[in-house]
């Protein structure tokens, strides 16, 4: 439960900072339209509600442990392992490196490399399944944005 409260607190701080940034947006650009503040306000509200509910949520493992202790006092319960935060931090690091790769070498190469690394981190074999999957996803996104939506994707600053 302690980890849920830490995560919820961090999320609430991020939500408060985002809410401060959205106060500088204009109310509306056209009469009768919701305006640029509408979508961030809805998202902030949903995120705040979910963060507060996360803060007050009981950990299911701890609740089960207390029920077992109440029923069977004689049995010893082995302590559960803590949430492996190092794995989550490694995935976040790979995500951050992927953003830098997209900036430096372009969208296609950066996303293929970073997505393959993330898939390898969660247990996929690197060759050929992870690389094939990440290449397929990257090409689908590239054709969707470049061809269908006519939105250019980053080419990279090195090339």
Image (tube, grey):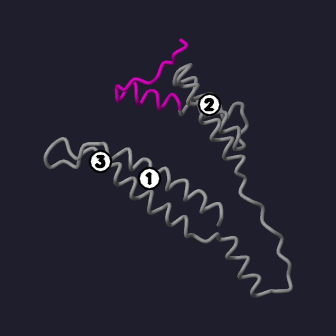
Mark 3 or mark 2, which is nearer to you?
3
Q: Which residue is mark 1?
A: 16
Name the residue tied to disc 3: 37
Instruction: Report the Cα–Cα distance between label 3 and label 1.
Output: 15 Å
Tell me the element at label 1: helix
Give x and y (percent) for residue 11: 52, 54
In which quadrant will I find the N terminus?
A: bottom right
Query: Does residue 116 appear left or right of residue 141 in this picture?
Result: right
Q: Nearer the viewer, residue 108 or 30?
A: 30
Farthest top residue in view: 159
* Secondary structure beneath label 3: loop
**Number of residues whose C-alpha sits closer than 10 Å to that of mark 3, classed few (under 14), some (14–19) or many (20 or more):** some
Mark 1 vs mark 2, CA separation in Å = 27 Å
- Label 1, residues with CA under 10 Å away: few <14, some 14-19, many ≥20: some
Q: Is residue 100 above or below residue 31?
A: above
Query: Magenta segment range?
Result: 138-159
Please say if 124 is above or below 44: above
Q: Percent x, y for residue 154?
A: 46, 22
**Image disc number at residue 53:** none
What is the CA distance from the residue labelled 3 to the residue labelled 2? 31 Å
Please state if 9 lies on the left or on the right of 145 as rendered: right
Residue 81: image location, x then y, percent: 78, 61
| In front: label 1 or label 2 | 1
The mark that comes first in sequence, 1 or 2, is 1
Residue identifier under label 2: 97
Give residue 107's position: percent from left, percent from top. Answer: 51, 25
Sequence-wise first label, 3 or 1: 1
Q: Residue at x 81, y 68 (%)?
A: 79
Q: Label 2's element?
A: helix
Q: Residues within 10 Å of mark 2 (few under 14, many from 20)?
A: some
Q: How many marks?
A: 3
Q: Residue at x 40, y 25 (%)?
A: 146
């Amino acid at each position: 439960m302690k980890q849920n409260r830490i995560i919820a607190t961090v999320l609430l701080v991020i939500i408060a900072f985002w809410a401060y940034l959205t106060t500088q947006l204009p109310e509306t650009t056209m009469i009768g339209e919701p305006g640029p503040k509408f979508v961030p306000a809805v998202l902030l509200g949903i995120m705040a509600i979910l963060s507060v509910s996360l803060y007050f949520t009981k950990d299911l493992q701890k609740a089960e442990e207390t029920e077992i202790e109440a029923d069977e006092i004689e049995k010893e319960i082995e302590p559960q392992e803590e949430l492996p935060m190092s794995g989550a931090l490694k995935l976040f690091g790979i995500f951050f490196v992927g953003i830098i790769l997209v900036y430096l070498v372009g969208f296609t190469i950066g996303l293929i490399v970073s997505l393959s690394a993330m898939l390898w981190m969660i247990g996929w074999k690197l060759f050929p399944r992870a690389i094939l999957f990440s290449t397929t996803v990257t090409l689908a996104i590239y054709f969707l944005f470049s061809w269908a939506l006519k939105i250019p994707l980053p080419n990279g600053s090195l090339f």
